[in-house]
Amino acid sequence: MSTIPATTSGSSRPQAPEKAWWKEASVYQIYPASFNDSDGDGLGDIPGIIQKVDYLGALGVDVVWLCPVYESPQIDMGYDVSDYRSIHAPYGTVEDVDRLIAALHERRMRLVMDLVVNHTSDQHVWFRESRSSLSNPKRDWYIWKKPRWDAAGNRLPPNNWASVFGGSAWSWDETTGEYYLHLFCKEQPDLNWENPDVVQAVHDIMTFWLDKGVDGFRMDVINFISKSPGLPDAPLKLPGQEFQPGDLHYANGPRLHEFLRGLREVLDRYDAFAIGEMPCVKEEQDVLMAVAADRKELNMIFQFDIVSIDIGSGGKFTSKTWSLAKMKAIVNKWQTCMYDNNGWNALFLENHDQSRSVSRFTPHRPENRTAAAKMLATFLALQSGTVFVYQGQELGMANLPREWPIDEYKDVETLNLYRLAMQQHRGDSEAVEQLMDQVRLKARDHSRSPMQWNAQQHGGFTTGTPWVRANDADYMHCNAEQQLRDPTSVLAYWRQLLRLRKQNVDVFVYGRFELLAAADPSLFCYRRIDPSGYGVATLVLNFTDCEYEWQVPPAEVVEALTAARCVLGNYEPPAELNGDGSMRLKPFEALVILELEDLYEGA
């Protein structure tokens, strides 16, 4: 066997990353409204999650990330918090959270909660006090500005920033005669992190939940908490639009890292971990400033390069053609950058803000859906980083049916952007249909449909009427009960994947990444190489819905197939080398070839 060359200058072997429990963990994200309804009111709840902890344990995950369950008017499904120390009554009680923590800890799993502190609900007592008068002590807990006026005397917002959900990022308050900033819905006013009392209040919220046994936080849009002084106008990016994306002035602001270090000080007192959601971040240095180990800020972040790969310049519901070459470049960039700079990746394709990956990234014939879901699972779970699995992803759940009308979509982002687009495209039926094509592909509603537990009514999610329609075209043949009985199911495959990752952490968690066959337009191939020299894994992934004749596989693949065995694949038997050295891969075929021995022997 040939020697794998070292990558660290002056050393015979690559330097291994520092080990940590959260690097080896796999995380399961729960969207509580749609997970499991225990009382028949049509809304998922915390007791319903407790009923399913053994299911999660059997899957092999280590951490449960719970989307917001705090008291909330639910304008944005809990991301508008009105009380951080209380639980939204339909979800349960604080005591129910205590029981969930205990149930998970008994099974050696941990709980991560969502921390939503860029903004609150407008019903939070802080904001109700803040808007009550100009002199209220809580006035500067939020961001208020006087209006601008045009030449004709018309009142204008303080700047031209657009809300993420459409329209202006500013709303007028008649009582006090000023505008307040809301980067999202008008019911989600942004907190003023320049006020040290706000920072301390956030630290106190974290301490409250950490004292209860919570093991960490996922921090919502955490890189938006520091804004540019003076809140200047955004540059013109969307000609013809009144309001412009202002992320230049609110993403990664001047005091962000100071604030993140303060949050980390709280977490370190509990050996808790933090993952930050950081939209609008593209450059390696910006990410490393937040996640490099010596920075003592975040453990990892969600960055959005892959899930933005098909988003056009006009926003989420505009299209852009993507190629596998582009996806390879993204993956290679972050895999090598983090490894070389002592950072860490968060690996995800789905979450509550994204549609279903099997529908979005692998257009497929119905008979190939299972293979496509397994291939994507392999692609994701064996990269370097902490693996995040979104509820239903382990089943290969798909997007909602294409024939569903816009009336079936309930998400505030979908409806707001649809309304604005309809105003823009009034009378243009072709443009409206193009818009609906993108809604059918990318709307958040797809991931928020009820979890498909069995083939009973509403997929077994509830005995009542679900808050959103279950995917009744799908749950009869894609559900957990059926897949638990099927050793060839997507669920069974995920269990095998996570077990393989845990059994070989030096390769699949701490090994370095090496891209192979970079120019191949249909196959994604990579290796994971144990830095201490005792193992290498070679992955071959067909991203197409058809058989693929691989005429000249790279030497590394040929050598792996000759010297080692396929330890996991989504077809039986797996593809092999033909006599002429070529390979024929089935639609969406995935191969994991593992060699375990001293690769540096004799070096």
Image (spheres, rainbow, N blue to C red):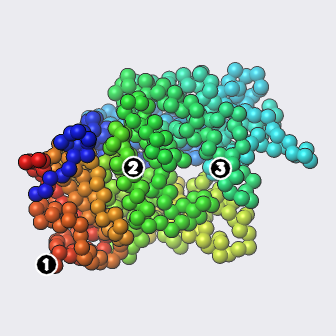
Q: Position of residue 238 (x, y in %)?
A: 68, 57
Which amino acid type corresponds to the residue marked 3 in the rendered image? Pro
Q: Which mark is residue 579?
A: 1
Q: First in sequence: mark 1 or mark 3?
A: 3
Q: Are marks 1 and 3 in contact (CB under 8 Å)?
A: no
| Residue 4 percent across, percent down from the top left | 18, 52
Please state which of the two labelled residues, at mark 3 or mark 2, is closer to the viewer.
Answer: 2
Residue type, numbered disc 2? Trp
- Asked which quadrant contains residue 415, the reply is bottom right
Instruction: Answer yes or no: is residue 126 visible.
Output: no
Q: Amino acid at mark 1?
A: Gly
Residue 91 drawn at (x, y percent) = 47, 41
Q: Under tag 3, what secondary structure?
A: loop
Distance from disc 3 to disc 2, alpha carbons, whole Å, reads 25 Å
Residue in the picture at 20% in, 50% down? 5
Q: Quadrant of the N terminus?
A: bottom left
Q: Quadrant of residue 123?
A: top right
Mark 2 element type? helix
Q: Is residue 591 visible?
A: yes
Mark 1, Cα crowd under 10 Å, few <14 / some 14-19 / many 20+, is few
Q: Earlier in the sequence, mark 1 or mark 2?
A: 2
Residue lying at 49% horizontally and 69% vertically, measured from the top left: 401
Disc 1, SS: loop
Label 1 to label 3: alpha-carbon separation: 56 Å
Name the residue that disc number 2 marks: 334
Inter-mark Cα distance, 1 to 2: 37 Å
Instruction: Classify 10 Å Cα crowding around label 3: few (below 14), some (14-19), many (20 and above).
Output: many
